[in-house]
Image (spheres, rainbow, N blue to C red):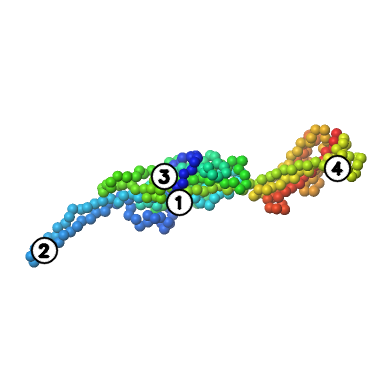
Amino acid sequence: MKPFTGRIKRVALAMMALSAVGVSSSVFAAVGETTAGIDITNTATVSYTVGTSAQNPVSSNVATFRVDQKVDLTITGGTPTTTNPGALNQALIYTVANTGNGNDSYTLSVSQSAADNFDTTGIEIYLDNGDSTFGAGDTLISAPLPLARDTSAVVFIVSDIPLTATNGQTAILTLTGTTTLTANTGADNPTGLDVVFADTGNNGTEGDDNNYAIEAATLSVVKSASVISDGISVSNPKAIPGAVVQYTIVVTNTGGVQATSVTLTDDIPSNTTYVLNSMTLGGTPLVDNGGTGTTTGAPVSQISINAGNVGFAPGSNSVTATFRVTVN
């Protein structure tokens, strides 16, 4: 059982009255312990003789006490969730277990770490429907979560990932559960039901972390221009009117996942004219408006090249496109 550690930023409070998902009793410390609220009674008997004659036994009064409630719970974060910038309704999985000797209900809340890389938004807590996978069949938690002794429930923290998150970053979220019962700190009441906090912090509160791990494509774009010809010098052409200038655009992915549907768009600069059918992708010539390379305007004011996917493994993590203009 992991002690609860406080977090700086308290984000959301959510609770719910729903039946719990049971698991094997072998994981619960309270298995075999007497259930809270049971009365234990005992009577003493004295037998004796007078002379040689056995007398009638004498019985004491009945001594009775009630088994008090030992509050104990565990919260365990599951496998971290790998996700992408801008992803919505991303779920972190946790297990909440009642390890005490009586039925209990827990107020669930979420806090975000101040020591991670980013905060998520739109945080909600859901109760799993039994398949341990977040989906449409799960129920939003909006009241204290009841758990019978020796049972547990799978719950999800669900939130949205900011578009500004970058590859390799993490967001740590803590799920905290607090009993709705109040501890009795005075003298024992033999006929009443006292409540004792037996969790690690003896405060009726436990929590654990889980985290989102970002896998993202990180693209960089480098553009250069070189004079191809000027109609005068073959070896050292200059950017004079009538010269042909080639623009080269290199897109590189230094992230952790493939970038898909990569499109390069470039405006034709003032004082130049686009050279028709001059676009290339990966060294392959493209036909204007043939599907991969498109132009806008007449005369052409913008070109666009569909570069497809850019991988992240060395050797396949970049793509090069070119097009040409003449200097007016």
Residue 179 in percent (x, y) is at 39, 45
Gap between marks 2 and 3, in whole Å?
Answer: 59 Å
Is residue 103 in sight in this rendering? no
Query: How far apart are the alpha carbons under marks 3 and 4?
Result: 72 Å
Query: Mark 2 against mark 1, which lies toward the viewer?
Result: 1
Depth check: give the residue in front, 172 or 298.
Answer: 172
**Toward the viewer: 193 or 114?**
114
Residue at 16% across / 60% down in the picture? 46
Q: State how far apart marks 2 and 1 are (Cα).
A: 60 Å
Q: Is residue 51 left or right of residue 34?
A: left
Mark 2 or mark 4, which has the lower sequence index? 2
Label tally:
4
The residue located at (40%, 55%) in the rendering is 28
Within 10 Å of the Cα at label 3, are there few (<14), some (14-19), or many (20+) other Cα atoms? many
Query: For mark 1, what is the residue?
Result: 2
Give the mark nearest the N terminus, 2 or 3: 2
Tag 2: amino acid: Thr
Check disc 4: other Cα within 10 Å, few if <14, some if 14-19, many if 20+.
many
Rendered view: 85 above or below 151: above
Q: Mark 4 = which residue?
A: 228
